[in-house]
Amino acid sequence: MKKAQGKAFLEEIREALSLLNFAEVEIENQQFLIKIKGTELSNKILKLLKI
């Protein structure tokens, strides 16, 4: 049961990360990624990773 829950949660994480949308911009020869859209879970993941 625990393994099934863990696999389901990992699939949720994969899906949340795949749904992230970024725009790439260049300002004064520096490239930046701007987050455009995300789910609640993907936003939490980025916050935990300090991105």
Image: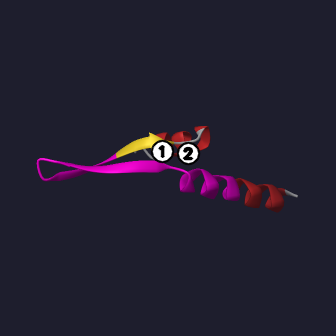
Please report the bounds of the magenta region as a residue range: 10-33
Q: Residue at x 17, y 51 (%)?
A: 30
Distance from Cα at disc 1 to Cα at disc 2: 6 Å
Residue 51 position within the rendered picture, expressed as x and y whole percent measured from the top left:
40, 45
Tag 1: Cα neighbours inside 10 Å, few (<14), some, or many (≥20)?
Answer: few
Q: Tell me the number on the disc at residue 42.
A: 2
Is 8 on the left-hand or right-hand side of 28? right
Name above or below for residue 6 compared with residue 49: below
Check if mark 1's residue and mark 2's residue have beta carbons within 8 Å. yes
Residue 10 position within the rendered picture, expressed as x and y whole percent measured from the top left:
67, 58
Asked which secondary structure carries label 1, the reply is: helix
Residue 42 position within the rendered picture, expressed as x and y whole percent measured from the top left:
55, 45
Question: Is residue 13 covered in magenta?
Answer: yes
Disc 1: which residue: 46
Check disc 1 and give the amino acid type: Leu
Is 2 on the left-hand or right-hand side of 44? right
Q: Residue pushed farthest right?
A: 1
Q: Residue at x 11, y 47 (%)?
A: 28
